[in-house]
Amino acid sequence: MTGQAVPIAPPTPGRWRAAARARRSPLLLLGGAIVSVSLVLAVVGPAIAPYDPIEPTGDVLVPPPALGDIPSLIAQTIGGSLERPVHWFGTDQTGLDIFSRVLAAPQVDVLIGVAATALALLLGTTLGLLAGYFRGRSAGFIARASDVFQSIPIFVLAMIVVVFTGRSTMAIIVTLAILYTPIYLRLTASEVAAQAARRHVEASRAIGNRELVTAFRHVLPNALTPALVQASVTIGWAILFTAGLTFLGAGVRPPTAEWGGMIASGANLLILGQWWPSLFPGIAISITVFGFAVVGDRLEARFRG
Amino acid sequence: MRKGTSILLTATVATSLLAPAAVTAQDQTQLVILSPDAVAALDTEAPGTLVLESMAALVNLMEPLVEFAPAGTHSEGGVHQLDFTSFEGRLAESWEFDPDTLTYRFHLRQGVIGCSGNEFTADDVLYTFARAKSASGTLGPLGWFMFNTGGVAGFTPDVLAPDADRSLGDEVTKVDDFTVDIKVASQRRLFLPVLTDFFVFIWDSKEMQAHATEADPWSHEYATTTNAPSFGPYCLESWTKGSELTAVANPSYYRGPAAIDRIVFRKVPETANRIAALQAGQAHIVQNLTPRDYEFLRQAGNGVHVDSIVGNQFLFLGLSWNVPPFENQALRQAFAYAIPYEEILSTGYGGQATKWEGTVPSSYVGFHRTDAQYTTDLEKAAHLLDEAGFPGGAGLDQYPGVLRLAYVAERESTLGPIATLIQSSFRQIGVELELDPMPQAQFADRVFSKHDVGMFLDDQDKPDLPTAEYALGPFMTTGGPGNYTLFSDPAVDAYFPAVYEETDPAKQDQMLAEIQEIIMATPNWLPIAEYATQWGVRDGVSGLTWHPDLQLRWYDLKVEP
């Protein structure tokens, strides 16, 4: 055996493959970073904010520092020579620190987005599995009910539900979950219908598995991918929707730090030249929704092949 | 520079919106007023009348029998004031009172021609009283209520019973075409002020009857949707529902035609657009801005100034008497001491307000600055909270949903920061409030009708008649029609109706002062601020006069050529 040894590449661990894919897709990397930051802020945002996000500071409508002052203010902040933290994004008409509120808002916006999407995913995939796999009269009813829900303007429906159930985080989560469930139902039902005709499903039946076992153990896992890919996009929608509801006065209660509410309360000040109360939360929500949308889009592209 | 850019953008939008009715330099006698809502109804007994813009139209299209006389003074903010103890004739030229028969005799002005061409006579006065007594409108019998408040004989509560005879009896009689007798059940200081209220302005009976039907003998449909025929200084020219009303000066008006030929009263909901239109010269007067907007206009100049007066607009925190634990006096007082008054005046109103030191607007006849006063004193508040049985706020959690501070969501830009300041201050004594902004309609239904809101912030209420007995009677007596906190104190009730009927002004004011002391010590309304009523006005426009209904009389306005 004198032949030249052929170098064999070591097996690439899964996480290395993911990193390699991410390097090939800078957009996915950017989206992933944004999503990661927003998820981290959803947990620690209020704790790292320089001011209490719902406590007036006494400084009313203070503009953000001039660009030229920022380096020295950063240095003073690091050096600990300032008596009070800088209002990096200024303050609003109540004297609330906008930077602190922008940092704290993901605790509401992202939490609602993630929780509502998770609930919608759970309900939608379960109902979609039943509708797609069994295809009986009840399946037809589920599909029609889903059509009815989707035909109602969702903002109007959401406002009605929130008016009746009260302005609470839980009410918004449940409302959004109900509104988004039909999306997952349809995605899952069509995928389940395609999977149900496959041989491994037939094989499961042939060996005597009950229909429910077959559906949950052999069909659902293979039909979940489109729904999971959709989840990232839905979280972005939900964040936007929550902000929209609060903007219209039907979302979370003031003075809870929430981007939509901050934009709404600052919108009236634009004419007075006080742009900062609405600009910074506007930028924050744009970046966050963009991040979730990009992740969803890239994952979908990968899924479609 | 930044301000300039945003204003320019908004001005461009507003200009495009308003261009069709632009006011040009050549058209000096047209005046454009912008308001956030549109005239909803022109019947004094229709629900749409409660929209402020409807009131604005009514007070200018219709005419009263009497009016408050000018005081000859003006506020620091340049608004002319009235003397609430002195009256001058409008459709009534003069009047006298006979204490033996408790009868007012009104001598009516002759030769007064209304917008429909009809001459004003005693029949119009009788029609107005009869219509009010019919209680036939859909809003509620506000005409009846006003005459009842003024003590007019026959306008008693039993008239409102389902099978009661609501026809006008001998309480109002025609002596001749230009003389009318009005009997009162008792002599009240409120009688003449009542006649200045737009709910009892005089109808043109001939025109109204021309539009009556068997089903609608009092022409409510016509007045609600089409016109308010009367003898006022302006006549309706056009009315586009939900958008705009234009009025032209009545050429036959008995005080002489108005200085401004045409008034355009237009709905522009967005605050920013109203400001931009004013600055661009597309409007002469804008109203219902926030204090911060007015401050901006003041500083910006641009040919615009702000006229203001602290009149009868106030902010208070209402505590419902029927909602536990607010029946606890020490708790209410603790809350009163926890309110951050100074911060509210400076942050919420930008300095355009003063601390309210009583339970009646300070401009009203009979106002008394009470001995009991509440200032921000968190230590005292904490002590009172302890005394109330809730040390450090402990125990309040057994009243779920009660510690919610409700306010009108549409007023968020003004009330939101104030509510947040109160929430923050209460937190310091251990009371955790939840803020509960709700739509105007829901707020009105729950606070004024259902009475199921424990705490609320209200800055839109005001007694229309500028006397203390009116500000207290309907609002603070058991079962009073305006008593929506369901406050009940036998000591206060005991003063009524005697305080209405006291003819010695000194004794009457003494009684009113005692009532105000009781209420302030109790307190169910926590008075916070009296804030300025303001208008953004183009330079060259003058003559703004403050009336307790907050509506400008267009006849008083002047525009410099």
Image: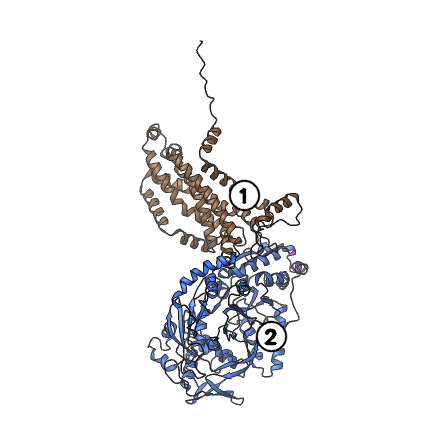
Q: Is residue A83 above or below residue B74?
A: above
Residue A224 shows in this picture: no
Residue tagged 2: B367
Instruction: Identify the residue at horizontal 33%, vertical 42% (top origin).
Output: A139
Expressed as whole percent of the image width and height from the top left, the position of residue B75 reads: 57, 74
Expressed as whole percent of the image width and height from the top left, the position of residue B417 reads: 56, 58
The color chain B is rendered in: blue
Viewport quadrant of the N terminus of chain A: top left
Expressed as whole percent of the image width and height from the top left, the position of residue B152 reads: 49, 82
In space, the residues marked 1 and 2 are separated at their CA atoms by 54 Å
Q: Which residues are magenta?
A: B382-391
B181 with respect to B222 (left or right):
right
Q: Chain of mark 2?
A: B
Viewport quadrant of the C terminus of chain A: top left
Q: Is residue B453 above or below residue B145?
A: above
Front tag of 1 and 2: 1
Q: Amino acid at mark 2?
A: Phe
Asked whether residue B242 is drawn in magenta, I would say no
Marks 1 and 2 share the same chain = no
Q: Amino acid at mark 1?
A: Leu
Comparing B298 with B349, the one in front is B298
Dot 1, crowdedness within 10 Å: few (<14), some or many (≥20)? many
Residues at circles 1 and 2 in contact by the CB criterion of under 8 Å: no
SS state under label 1: helix
Expressed as whole percent of the image width and height from the top left, the position of residue B107 reads: 47, 88
SS state under label 2: loop
Q: Is residue B352 above or below residue A109?
A: below
Asked whether residue B386 is drawn in magenta, I would say yes
Q: Chain of mark 1?
A: A
Residue tagged 1: A41
Q: What is the quadrant of residue B135 in the picture?
A: bottom left
The color chain A is rendered in: brown
